[in-house]
Image: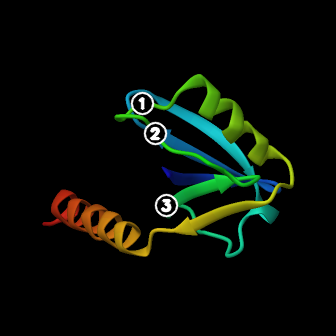
Amino acid sequence: MIKGTIDRFEGQYALVEIAYEEIFFIDILSENFTVLPSEGDIIIIESIKGISVSDEYGFVSDEVKKILCMLENPVETLILIDKDQTEERKSRIEKLASELFED
């Protein structure tokens, strides 16, 4: 599995930040999601066209990056929203914002 964060939506695409050893972005066609995520959601990409995708020891290979690029088009895929990690991230951001802006 590969995890990413929904950075923003541009037209019919979600721009997703993938942060492992390096940070890179991919576009995912909105129709490839069974449930449309929101900005800031953590997603889990399990498979694309029946091909299981995963990081290897914290590194995403060039081969996997090529497979991830298939998400720019309609493909059979399994993408889930990691609700627990998304909530944890949102709580952490809210806490930092309240500390930053307290009187």
Label 1 – label 3 distance at C-alpha: 22 Å
Residue shown at 52% from the left, 59% from the top? 44
| Label 1: element kind | loop
Label 3 crowding class (10 Å Cα cut-off): few <14, some 14-19, many 20+?
some
Q: Image height check: is 67 above or below 75?
A: above
Could you tell me which quadrant the C terminus lies in? bottom left
Residue shown at 70% from the left, 37% from the top? 67
Residue 22 at what x, y percent from top left?
43, 27
- Disc 2 residue type (three-letter): Asp
Q: How is the image coloured?
A: rainbow
Which marked residue is nearer to the observer: mark 2 or mark 3?
2
Which marked residue is nearer to the observer: mark 1 or mark 3?
1
- Disc 3 residue type (three-letter): Gly
Label 2 – label 3 distance at C-alpha: 21 Å
Residue shown at 70% from the left, 31% from the top? 66
The disc, 1 or 3, on the residue closer to the chain's N-terminal end is: 3
| Label 2: element kind | loop
Pick whichever, 79 or 56, lies toward us: 56
Label 1 – label 2 distance at C-alpha: 5 Å
Q: Which mark is residue 55?
A: 2
- Disc 1 residue type (three-letter): Phe
Q: Which mark is residue 40?
A: 3
* Side of 29 relative to 7 (left or right): right
Residue 15 at what x, y percent from top left?
65, 47
Q: Which mark is residue 59?
A: 1
Q: Image height check: is 53 above or below 67?
A: below
The disc, 2 or 3, on the residue closer to the chain's N-terminal end is: 3
